[in-house]
Image: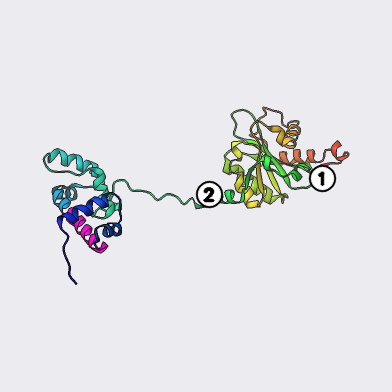
């Protein structure tokens, strides 16, 4: 086979076409040149260019190796001092030096850098939870709540709300009400952090074996993470519209009953859980006209 070298004209044509974004195969078809020939030409070109760059910045690279210290003289400091000491010698930019380091062209490893990048924490758990919510539609607006839940003929559909105590106190009460039986459970919460509230409600439901088929809450910040609880329980969580407390009428009416024992503005700091259990028992034992004067315990 006969081989011919690329002429200067061919090299110029290759450079022009490749600058237009064409691939090596497309350039080869247009110029009737093998794409492997173009590949070797570009490879040799970049190698030659790299050698020229190394010669150009040879003094700086030597200075960098002699003066770089991760404790006292960072790369930025070395560049600053080099420019001040060698005013007529070419000096690369800081970005260019970091590009050389990332490409492995300068033997400064990441462990030797002044500012080490810390590995980000693995958030796959929360991301999987978010993806699960999107795929399975765990958290939904209340307008998508099925009509049979509105009929209150089935136990296990819960409404959850928080009852606040004295102003500027962190303590609160989480009230859980069954829409069918109107049975109430009260939980003492020391903080209003969303993940703390989520864990508190989940553990209380599991411990007391509360039947759960759906959960309805308001848009309070303390319930932002309650979708995790709903996911673990395998149920849907329905969010009420803002400023629409009537969408949780059972919850609001039950909270009014709790206020008979704990008036609004009362401090909850020294209120123990056992006292809340007594209040729950008294409310659940209360005869109700809607049940023909039966109590919540009598409703099956």
**What colour scheme was applied to this rendering of the protein?**
rainbow
At a point 88% along the width and 39% down the height, the residue shown is: 292
- In-image side of 87 versus 124 (left or right): left
Pointer 1: what residue?
297
Q: Is residue 34 magenta?
A: yes
Relative depth, front residue between 233 and 276: 233
Residue linked to disc 2: 126
Query: 129 or 55: nearer the eye?
Result: 55
Residue 185 falls in image quadrant = top right
Residue 167 image point, x, y percent = 61, 28
Above or below for 283 versus 131: above
Task: Tell me if mark 1 has few (under 14), some (14-19) or many (20+) residues whose alpha carbon lies within 10 angstroms of its own.
Answer: some
Q: What range of the chain is rendered magenta?
A: 33-51
| Camera-side mark, 2 or 1 | 2
Q: Is residue 191 visible?
A: no
Left or right: where does residue 49 sit relative to residue 111?
A: left
Residue 18 locus on image (x, y percent):
26, 52
Can residue 251 be found in the magenta stretch? no
Is residue 266 shown above or below 97? above
Where is residue 247 drawn, in percent x and y? 71, 35
Q: Residue at x 65, y 52 (%)?
A: 234
**135 left or right, relative to 122:** right
Distance of label 2 from label 1 (alpha carbons)? 38 Å
């Amino acid at each position: 086979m006969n081989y011919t070298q690329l002429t200067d004209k061919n090299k110029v044509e290759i450079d022009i076409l490749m600058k237009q974004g064409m691939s090596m195969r497309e350039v080869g078809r247009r110029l009737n040149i093998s794409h492997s020939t173009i590949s070797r030409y570009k490879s040799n070109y970049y190698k030659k260019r790299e050698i020229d760059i190394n010669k150009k910045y040879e003094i700086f690279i030597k200075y960098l190796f002699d003066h770089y210290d991760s404790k006292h003289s960072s790369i930025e400091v070395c560049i600053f001092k080099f420019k001040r000491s060698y005013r007529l010698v070419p000096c690369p930019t800081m970005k260019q030096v970091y590009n050389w380091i990332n490409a492995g062209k300068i033997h400064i490893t990441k462990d030797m850098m002044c500012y080490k990048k810390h590995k980000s924490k693995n958030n796959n758990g929360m991301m999987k939870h978010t993806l699960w919510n999107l795929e399975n539609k765990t958290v939904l607006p209340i307008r998508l709540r099925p009509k049979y839940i509105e009929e209150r003929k089935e136990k296990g559909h819960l409404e959850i709300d928080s009852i606040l105590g004295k102003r500027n106190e962190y303590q609160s009460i989480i009230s859980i009400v069954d829409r069918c039986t109107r049975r109430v459970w009260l939980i003492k919460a020391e903080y209003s952090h969303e993940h703390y509230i989520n864990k508190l409600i989940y553990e209380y439901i599991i411990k007391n074996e509360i039947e759960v088929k759906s959960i309805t809450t308001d848009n309070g910040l303390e319930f932002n993470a309650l979708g995790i609880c709903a996911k673990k329980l395998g149920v849907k969580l329905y969010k009420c519209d803002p400023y629409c407390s009537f969408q949780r009428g059972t919850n609001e009416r039950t909270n009014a009953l709790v206020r008979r024992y704990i008036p609004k503005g009362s401090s909850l700091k020294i209120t123990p859980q056992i006292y809340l259990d007594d209040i729950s028992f008294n409310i659940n034992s209360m005869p109700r006209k809607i049940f023909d004067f039966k109590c919540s315990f009598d409703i099956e």
